[in-house]
Amino acid sequence: MHFFLNWGKNTPDTEKNKLFFQAICAQGTRILILPFSEWTEKPILFDASAEREFYEKRRDIIARYNLDKELQFECARRDIPTLVEQIQNSDILFFCWGKTYKHLEVTNDIPNLKDLLQDKIIVGCSAGALMWSKAYYSLRAEKLYEGNGFLPIKLIVHRRSDTYPGLPDEEREKILENYGEKFPIYKIPEQEYIEFDL
């Protein structure tokens, strides 16, 4: 599996975002968007209509940079047997930003997930990137959490900014560094991405 991990702020029409989405579209045509992490203050487990809207917005963003390819988009379902079939029929899995734990709540229930993803392109933006790490630091919560551990890395997304003005990056990095095993820590600026093979 090949990972594109992006640090967020994908909606502005910038040269960096254009290059990111074109790099993804070059990998295949069947794109499954997983909108499970939709960020909301509503005290609900999930809202199907909100997830659909979340999916449509991401679909439209990706489609702008399609490299003149005929892309096929699908919105992931929460029903695990259906979701497994959708993953099997996709080239690219796009995990959206939002709340990381919401992605993990669904994907942790998929049996043999690592085997299922072997030949896939996995795109993670913000929360969708954090979920693959051994550990990550949430700027919104100012806390450290564990990801699913697929990638031997630790992550901080967004870095220090006006949006997340809490602890300095150096303190967040120190907290991650002192947690668990030693793994590389990645902090990438907004609209940039890194790639990994697993």
Image: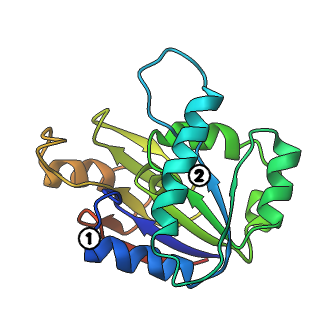
Q: Position of residue 31 (x, y in %)?
A: 66, 66
Q: Closest to the observer: 191 or 169?
A: 191
Instruction: Tell me the residue at 55%/32% (across/down).
Output: 50
The circle on residue 35 is: none
Instruction: Tell me the residue at 81%/39% (across/down).
Output: 79
Q: Quadrant of the N terminus?
A: bottom right
Q: Closest to the observer: 170 or 192?
A: 192
Q: State whether residue 73 appears in this view.
A: yes
- Which three-letter amino acid code belongs to the residue tagged 1? Thr
Q: Position of residue 26 (x, y in %)?
A: 56, 85
Q: Position of residue 118 (x, y in %)?
A: 74, 74
Q: Closest to the observer: 15 or 40?
A: 15
Q: Quadrant of the C terminus?
A: bottom right
Q: In the drawing, does residue 125 fall left or right of residue 51?
A: left
- With respect to residue 190, does 78 lie above or below? above
Q: In the drawing, does residue 134 fall left or right of residue 27?
A: left
The circle on residue 14 is: 1
Question: SS of the residue at dot 1?
Answer: loop
Q: State whether residue 147 appears in this view.
A: no
- With respect to residue 66, does 150 lie above or below? above
- Which three-letter amino acid code belongs to the residue tagged 2? Asn
Question: SS of the residue at dot 2?
Answer: loop
Q: CA distance from mark 1 to mark 2?
A: 31 Å
The circle on residue 148 is: 2
